Amino acid sequence: MNSSLKLRTVETGDLDQVASIEDSSFPDPYPPAVFWWFKFRAGDGFIVALEDEVLGYAISEIHQGEGHIVSMAVSPEHRREGVGTALLQESLKRLAPSAGEVYLEVRSTNKAAVRLYEKFSFTKTGEVKHRYYPDGEDAILMRRALNHSPFDKRRTAR
């Protein structure tokens, strides 16, 4: 990863570049208005990675005490450069104070994303079959704990 990579909360001026990355990354991209909505809904959970331009984004939220990685994408010309890793690390860091676990959905055919999530200790917990995504593709559900303290009462065996 390039040392000039910066991570920060999304700003209004980033949204066109985020929408462009979305369009080039998914067969059924979110419309641009969705990113405006997430900018206000997700707050600090909507981050971008940038150098001279936005290279990728991640959106995460807290739902009933659990973190949810809603969406993450890296510009095709900057994949395999550590941008996705940096975005995921920052998202997990921002979720950790408020959530004990985090979950996500990933396309069953997106092997690179599945490998990245497994590298960060996400495990497959299920599948959503029958057209989870608008283009008809299935999703894999993945989950991991965020707080790994040996003193965490939820993990203590009795």
Image (tube, rainbow, N blue to C red):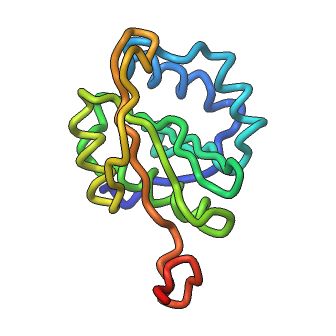
Which residue sits at x=50%, y=39%?
57
Which residue sits at x=34%, y=17%?
137
In the rendered structure, the answer to whether residue 80 lies left or right of residue 58 reads: left
Where's the N terminus, which quadrant? bottom left
| Residue 153: % across, % down | 59, 83
Q: In the figure, 149 relative to 142: above or below?
A: below
Which residue sits at x=54%, y=28%?
18
The mark tally for this picture is: 0
- Asked where in the image residue 135 lies, by quadrant, the reply is top left
In the rendered structure, the answer to whether residue 55 lies left or right of residue 99 reads: left
Front-lying residue, 150 or 35: 150
Front-lying residue, 60 or 130: 130
Front-lying residue, 148 or 45: 148
Judged from this view, the residue extending furthest toward the front is 158
Judged from this view, the residue extending furthest toward the right is 40
Q: In the figure, 10 relative to 101: above or below?
A: above
| Residue 82: % across, % down | 31, 52
In the rendered structure, the answer to whether residue 97 lies left or right of residue 58 reads: right
| Residue 112: % across, % down | 23, 39
Front-lying residue, 150 or 84: 150
| Residue 132: % across, % down | 44, 20
In the rendered structure, the answer to whether residue 10 lies left or right of residue 37 reads: left
